[in-house]
Every structure is written in structure tokens, then in C-alpha cells.
Image (spheres, rainbow, N blue to C red):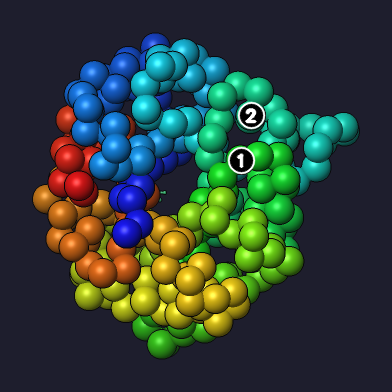
Amino acid sequence: MRKPFIAGNWKMNTDSRGAVKLAESIVRDCGDTTDSKVDVAVCPPFVYLQAVAGALSSSPVALGSQDVYFEQKGAFTGEISAAMLKDVGCTYALCGHSERRHVIGEADELINKKVHAAVSGGLLPILCVGELIEERKTNKTAEVVTRQMKKGLAGISEAKMPAITIAYEPVWAIGTGLTATPQQAQEVHALIRKLLAGMFSEKLAEEIRIQYGGSVKPDNAAELMNQQDVDGLLVGGASLKADDFVTIIKASV
Ligand code: 13P
């Protein structure tokens, strides 16, 4: 059985006080839900990681970053290494979020380097994949997701794979209020699991958690989580409200 994994991606939101207050409210309102039934993480902006780490200390809610650079140190102005993220208390790192791919322009090769750097640096990467609306309309979803999976995980050994979570986030569902139907989500999650079985093994594919992301809300979380291959949720907007995020967490167990 795969343990549910709910992560909140705060994107470029909050301020220093608001970030700490949000983290404190999530910890308080989760109560003991997180203890054994579900893994929970929040991914604040880089500049608030350390403050949020303080608010999460001695709680089961883990800290994640929204990105990671692949080099270890040196002249890479503006970038943040895996070691730095570990140093401030991160457990997870998002890699290849759709906004990094489509707004910032990251390619599969760069994302693959980030996945490798995160694993080598002792972080647990969440590799995000997902198609654009034009790609869905032209029946290219499977092709796009297959390419992102193969290129994103190139060179990762089966032994290292258990560190990795996959997040399927159809780009057309992100921040639009247009959630994928549970059936649409399940169809792509099943494809991702089949890809993992082919790239690694059936056993590994059964272990890896696949999150769904894209307009997840308190009222659609349970239905999405009921799908056989949906093991968790990557929540954007609704993770900025402690009430909504905690309702989603509780609906997932
Ligand atoms: P929304 O939940 O705001 O659609 O964002 C999803 C997302 O991109 C999470 O990483």
C-alpha cells in the first residue's frame, strides 16, 4: 500500500509573517492526522524556507523547495543548491514544475540534472509532468508525458527511484479551476505507472507515489484520491488557506 502524500506548493505567495502563520495553522489543524496515515509537505518560496522550518520543527509536516539547481556551489548567481536546501531543513524538492517548464523555459535535460542533483544531495525530488491544453486536444498527452518521464528520469537507477515522487499536473488544470476529472487523472496515472514498470520493474512501479495536481480543492480531493493510481495531491491555490489544505489532507486518508 502506498501512503498518501499531500504537498502544498505555495508558489510566489505569502510574506514572512504570513508564511510562518500558515505553517503554524497547518501543523495545529492537522492534529494527529499526519502521524501515520499521510505524508504532508509544504513548499514555500526559498526566502521563507528557514522561517517555515522553524514553524514545522517537531511536527510531522515536512518542508520542500519549489526548485533546486544542479550544481553544488560556485558562480551561479541566483541559484540554490541541494546542500543549501538540506541545510535549511528541506526534505523534498519540486523538479520541473509546469511553471518552471513553461514560464521560465526549463527543458527536460535541465530538469533531469536537477533530479540527479536532488537525489545525490539527499533530497526527495517530486518530478512534475503534464501536458498543455493544445497537446491534450491533439491527443498528444501520452506522448508528452512519456517524453517528460523518460528524459526526466534518464540515468536514475532503480535503487535510487524510491526517493522520487511523480506529480501529474495537466497544465490546463493549473490555477484555472478546471480540474481533470477523476477518470482523466486515473488514465494518465495508470500510464505513468506502466511507464515506470517498463523503465524499471513492476515492483518498483507499485511502490512509487504519483500525485495529481491542478485545481485540487476540498470538494474534489476525496474523489481524486479514490482513483486506484492517485496516491497523493500537489495543491497550489488551496494550500494557501490552512482550512482548505487541512480539509484536503483529511479527505485523503
Ligand atoms: P492549483 O492547485 O492552484 O491549480 O496549482 C496546482 C499546482 O501547480 C501545484 O503545483
The residue carrying mark 1 is 123
Q: Is residue 128 left or right of residue 160?
A: left
Q: Is residue 114 above or below residue 131?
A: above
Q: Check if mark 2's residue and mark 1's residue have beta carbons within 8 Å.
A: yes
- Image point 18% across, 63% down: which residue? 226
Q: Is residue 135 above or below residue 86?
A: below
Query: What count of labels does the image hold?
Result: 2
Q: Amino acid at mark 1?
A: Leu
Query: Is residue 144 at least partly visible in the picture?
Result: no
Q: Is residue 130 left or right of residue 151?
A: left
Q: Amino acid at mark 2?
A: Lys
Residue 74: image location, x then y, percent: 87, 32
Query: Is residue 201 at least partly visible in the picture?
Result: yes
Asked if disc 2 is less than 8 Å from ligand 1, the answer is no
Residue 169: image location, x then y, percent: 40, 61
Q: Is residue 33 above or below residue 234?
A: above
Q: Report how far apart the C-alphas of labels 2 and 1 lie in the structure.
A: 7 Å
- Image point 51% across, 51% down: which residue? 126
Q: Is residue 192 above or below residue 82?
A: below
- Image point 17% across, 40% down: which residue? 250
* Badge 2 element: helix
Asked if disc 1 is less than 8 Å from ligand 1, the answer is no
* Badge 1 element: loop
Label number found at residue 154: none
| Crowding near the residue tagged with mark 2, few <14, some 14–19, many ≥20 C-alpha atoms within 10 Å | some
Where, quadrant-wise, is the N terminus in this rendering?
bottom left
Tell me the quarter of the picture where residue 112 sits. bottom right
Residue 210: image location, x then y, percent: 40, 61
Of the image marks 2 and 1, the number of the one nearer the N terminus: 2
Q: Which one is nearer the viewer's eye here, 237 or 189?
A: 189
Label number found at residue 86: 2
| Crowding near the residue tagged with mark 1, few <14, some 14–19, many ≥20 C-alpha atoms within 10 Å | many
